[in-house]
Image (spheres, grey):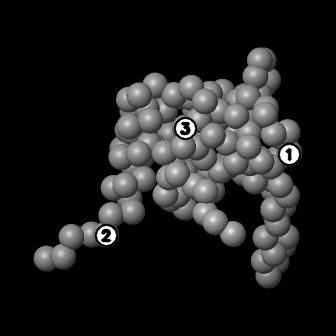
Amino acid sequence: MEERRQFVRLDTRLEVTFSVLPSGAPQQAMTRDISGGGICLFADRELAAGTRLQVTMKLPDREPPVHFTAEVVWSEAYETIGRAQRTRAIEVGVRFVEIAPQDQEAVMRHVILTMKPPSSR
């Protein structure tokens, strides 16, 4: 199977707040990964492909947060099994639909700089 992603993905946990458009209640979530084209987040329920979200995401060492409109591309159940408990969540993959150029640049910069190996001394 051929890889179709345009952007490299960074496995990272960042705080996000999202609302289902046009007028859903804000929900807190964490990212699973991010890229220059979108994010994968953990939600408490499945979201149908095509659903539009308004998202606010906090990047480390950056104020203000990044704001964007996203579209759900896929959504599926996710379960982790630990020694003491099972945790269930829903992974939701979204792509950026509307994002200010400076916010997209901040996301790309974060991904690139975080993935860059430390310089050798």
How packed mark 1 is, by other alpha carbons closer than 10 Å (few <14, some 14-19, many 20 or more), is: some
- Foreground residue, 72 or 62? 72
Foreground mark, 3 or 1, reads 1
Question: Can you say which quadrant of the picture contains the N terminus?
Answer: bottom right
Residue at left offset 63%, top offset 40%:
95
As drawn, the label of residue 106 is none
Whole-Å distance between the Cαs marked 3 and 2? Answer: 24 Å
Disc 1 marks a residue whose amino acid type is Glu
- Name the residue that disc number 3 marks: 57
Crowd rating for badge 3 (residues with CA inside 10 Å; few <14, some 14–19, many 20+)? some
Choose mark 3 or mark 2, whichever is in front.
Answer: 2
In this view of the protein, which residue sits in the foreground, 37 or 45? 37
Q: Position of residue 74 (x, y in %)?
A: 77, 48
Residue under pointer 1? 46
Q: Position of residue 38 (x, y in %)?
A: 58, 43
What amino acid is found at the position of numbered circle 3 in the picture? Met
